[in-house]
Image (cartoon, rainbow, N blue to C red):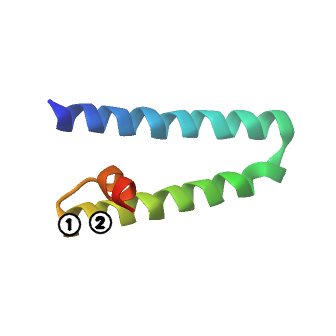
Amino acid sequence: MTGASVIILATAIGSGEMILWPYITSQIGFIFMWAAVVGFAIQFFLNMEIERYTLATGESAITGFTRF
């Protein structure tokens, strides 16, 4: 049950970004497209590092952050 909800949540977040950024671009112009690319890249690397931390330690990133 948790696995399916995580996949649905990730799809909803990703689709929201794919809908929001083209709308912003159509209203303002291509000047803010760099922000979309930077945001996607940062989000990808943060997610990958959190995933690696969880696989390496066996605890969630939130638990690690609270202990930090």
Q: Secondary structure at mark 2?
A: helix
User: Where does the image place residue 45, in percent across and percent down from the top left?
Assistant: 46, 65
Q: What distance separates the C-alpha of mark 2 from that of mark 1?
A: 6 Å
Picture quarter with the C terminus: bottom left
Label 2 sits on what residue type?
Tyr
Residue 26 versus residue 17: which sits nearer the camera? 17
Q: Is 25 on the left or on the right of 53, as rendered?
A: right
Q: How many marks?
A: 2
Q: Does 26 appear above or below 40?
A: above
Where is mark 2, residue-wise?
53
Instruction: Out of 8 and 49, give the one closest to the viewer.
Output: 49
Mark 2 Cα shell of 10 Å, populated few (<14), some (14-19), many (≥20): some
Within-10-Å neighbours for mark 1: few <14, some 14–19, many 20+: few
Residue at image coords 55%, 61%:
42
Is 33 on the left or on the right of 12, as rendered? right
Q: Nearer the viewer, residue 19 or 51?
A: 51
Residue 40 rendering spot, x and y as whole percentages? 56, 55
Q: Which quadrant would residue 28 be assigned to in this image?
A: top right
Image quadrant assignment for residue 50: bottom left
- Position of the N terminus by quadrant: top left
Residue at screen point 37% across, 53% down: 66
Residue 57: give its label.
Answer: 1
Three-letter amino acid code at disc 1? Answer: Thr
- Position of residue 15 measured from the top left corner of the image (x, y, whole percent): 48, 35
Q: Residue furthest front?
A: 67
Tell whether label 1 touches label 2 (CB within 8 Å): yes
Residue 58, percent from left and from top: 17, 60
Q: Secondary structure at mark 1?
A: helix
